[in-house]
Amino acid sequence: MSRRICIVTAVHGPSARFLPDAYTSLCAQELPDGWDWHWLVQEDGESDAVAPYVPADERVTFRQGRPGGPGVARMMALAHADGPYVKVLDADDQLPPGTLARDLAALEADPGIGWATSRALDLLPDGRTVGFPGDPEPGPIERGAVTDHWAAHDYRAQVHPATLCVRRDLLLAVGGWMALPASEDTGLLLALNSVSRGWFSPEVGLLYRKWEGQATGQAAHGDAVEREARMAVVAARARVLEGLGWRYPLSRTRS
């Protein structure tokens, strides 16, 4: 498998106009010698609204498919991932310089670390940025720590799932993003933390755009009945994985 970080982006018509900003942030990334990135942009649907915003770059692959939500789009993009690491980048977000290099350094340095996250800032419409309180200590995140914090803080994790960079084999092993109308990335984060140690970088690794069309800002996202159902199944998967006793990486013994 090539020495490549695959960036997976789900996009639909309203968010397509932000793709050039995401691309600019990718082009500003510097990777160690011998490494490169491959941007897998997957439209959640088959419209004519997205393609005009996709950069003409051999490092960018654009595909379309029937709509199923961002989790489905990411999973379809994952089918074409051709490197050992998968990085999440939502279409309306940006990666500050140095983000991919820090993720790669953390994962390459310790095979016992399955995934990496970093500090995130909200990017407001006027260009200002706002931070989040409660970041964890820099360095390793032990198994179960994210799920415990999430359960004790009204379903809010101490790390942002949109900052994930994960080993491709681990991502596949836990089943990828959950089949939910929202919180599919939180479900993945908790599943990963149930079976593997992670890493937190205190440097800003994501500019999370706030705008009127984003899915998390819509009224349906806050529906109490749906939210409780989403959180229940997210928690159930995490606890079942934890209870199975399977850990990443697997310890291999010779017969």
Image: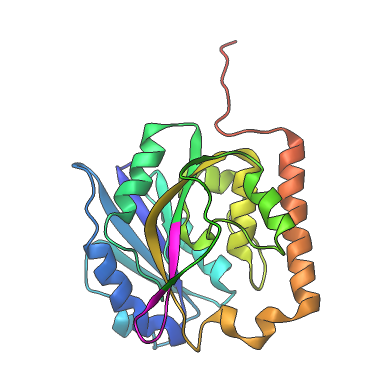
Q: Evaluate whether residue 174 shows in this view.
A: no
Q: Is residue 43 above or below residue 239?
A: below
Q: Is residue 210 left or right of residue 181?
A: left
Quadrant in the rendering for residue 177: bottom right
**Is residue 8 located in the magenta-colored stretch of the structure?**
no
Determine the residue located farthest toward the front in the rendered image: 133
Residue 7, percent from left and from top: 38, 59
In terms of depth relative to the viewer, which is nearer, 191 or 2?
Answer: 191
Residue at the spot x=72%, y=32% of the render?
245
Residue at the spot x=61%, y=86% of the render?
218
Q: Is residue 221 above or below residue 171?
A: below
Residue 189, percent from left and from top: 59, 54
In terms of depth relative to the viewer, which is nearer, 18 or 205?
Answer: 205
Residue at the spot x=22%, y=62% of the render?
28
Determine the residue located farthest toward the left in the rendered image: 33
Q: Which residues are magenta?
A: 119-129
Residue at the spot x=76%, y=60% of the render?
233
Numbered label tally: 0
Q: Is residue 232 left or right of residue 25?
A: right
Which quadrant does the C terminus fall into? top right
In terms of depth relative to the viewer, which is nearer, 75 or 230?
Answer: 230
**Is residue 123 located in the magenta-colored stretch of the structure?**
yes
Residue 23, percent from left and from top: 28, 70
Q: Is residue 249 above or below residue 29?
A: above
Which quadrant does the N terminus fall into? top left
